Image (spheres, rainbow, N blue to C red):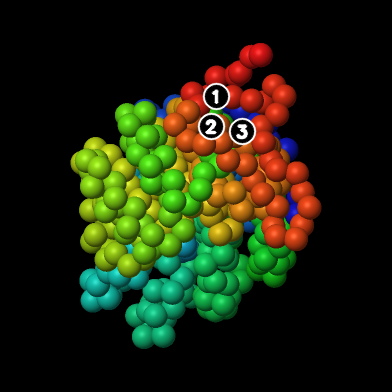
Amino acid sequence: MTQSSIPQAKGSFYGLGIAPKILEILDRMKFTVPTPIQHKAIPIAAEGKDIIAVAQTGTGKTLAFAIPIIQRLSQNKGNCLVLVPTRELAIQVDETFQKLAPLFGMRSAVIIGGASMHLQIQALKRNPRIIIATPGRLVDHMNQRNILLAFMNIVVLDEADRMLDMGFQPQIEQILKYIPKNRQMMLFSATIPPQIITIGTAHMRLPINIEIAPSGTVAEHVIQELFIVNRESKRKLLEKILAQYKGSVLLFSRTKIGAAKITRFIKGIGYNAAEIHSNRSLGQRKEALEGFKTGKYRVLVATDIASRGIDVIGIELVINYDLPEDAENYVHRIGRTARAGHEGRAISFATPDQKDDIRNIERITKAVLPVSRHPEFAAESFVAPQGVASKSFRPHGNNKRNYYGQRRTH
């Protein structure tokens, strides 16, 4: 791999090798200043080179590959395949392409589970130039011979680390076997686990490595807090926090059953809430997400399936009601707030026996999570596993902060 040496930041999309027609469209859309990932990725992708790009969530990655894809497809024959981990992300990516593709006479098709196979077959018969798909449903269509991949000359793996987390590597490998070897391949990810290096080595040609922020870097402008709380006190603490903050809240549960229970609790204390997880139909998930965007639901309760499929500017608060099973998902969860330069807050609940889980998160983020106390709850601290001697974890020195996040003085 070679390292991109393009400067980090410039003030406009001009000078990035973008065709005049696309620049006009960007001007009309009021897109005037590229994000760092857009500034670095667009010129390289427009040249047809392979890319492995690492950038935190909420940094404009979709437009960073959509612009050069539209430009290259308008100049050459062939099609593009974008693989994504979740249904929500597929729809979100398609929304970005829809801002550009129709103006060049290009169709896109979204191929995801939970939606009508018949309608997807009809969409594929209209010869879309861009296909956005989840791996499992795409393989279903391949097995039924509804789609040929022989004309795909651009392939994007978006949120590649999440696809690997979800066990999609066999399907990805199967799909890539049917795509021409002389394709362009772009891989976008927030973290770079070893399997991604393996994919890069096996399937890419001298990919250029672009790293906007170190793997595991959290989004800028996120104020992080940690509450150590007994399991039985979580709901009461949640009620207090929902009363304190007035904006939109994205809350993460570790399980689908937990998400349903928490949603019922939140509704019971008087807030409009919806849930989004794999037990909900595609229609229910779309309605929940749209209701959250429009303010119909103040609180959206989600499992990790939604941690990268929610592109909503203005989420005030992310609550990790349950810590993620995989510490890397902490970065993706809290990346749902503080998007597009806005400030946001992330509050995590940890039970006294979850010291190791917090340590794993801190190793990935390379930062200590500041511990907060609520004045109405007894102070808790981390305890060592049974039979292990260890000091309890408490805030110390100048890192002590009160419930409102203000620095304590003595």
Q: In which quarter of the image is residue 283?
A: bottom left
The outermost residue toward the bottom is 144
Q: Name the residue under label 1.
A: 402
The N terminus: image quadrant: bottom right
Between 278 and 47, the one lying in front of the other is: 278
Label pair 3/2, CB-CB below 8 angstroms: no
Q: How far apart are marks 1 and 3 (CA)?
A: 10 Å
Q: Which of 109 and 192 is in front in this view?
A: 192
Which amino acid type is marked by label 2?
A: Arg
CA separation, marks 2 and 1? Answer: 6 Å
**Tag nearer the camera, 3 or 2:** 2
Mark 3 packing: few (<14 Cα in 10 Å), some, or many (20+)?
A: some
Most foreground residue, 99 or 138: 138
- Can residue 93 be seen? no
Instruction: Classify 10 Å Cα crowding around label 2: few (below 14), some (14-19), many (20 and above).
Output: many
- For the C terminus, which image quadrant? top right
Circles 2 and 1, Cβ within 8 Å, touching? The answer is yes
Q: Nearer the viewer, residue 210 or 115?
A: 115
Q: Do the residues labelled 1 and 3 touch (CB within 8 Å)?
A: no
- Residue at figure coordinates x 55%, y 32% from the top left: 372
| Marked residue nearer the N-terminal end (2 or 1) | 2
Relative to 211, 172 lies left or right: left
Residue at image point 53% right, 71% down: 168
The amino acid type of the residue labelled 3 equals Pro
- The residue identified by callout 3 is 370
Name the disc covering residue 373, or none. 2
Kindly indicate the quadrant of the structure image that contains residue 172.
bottom right
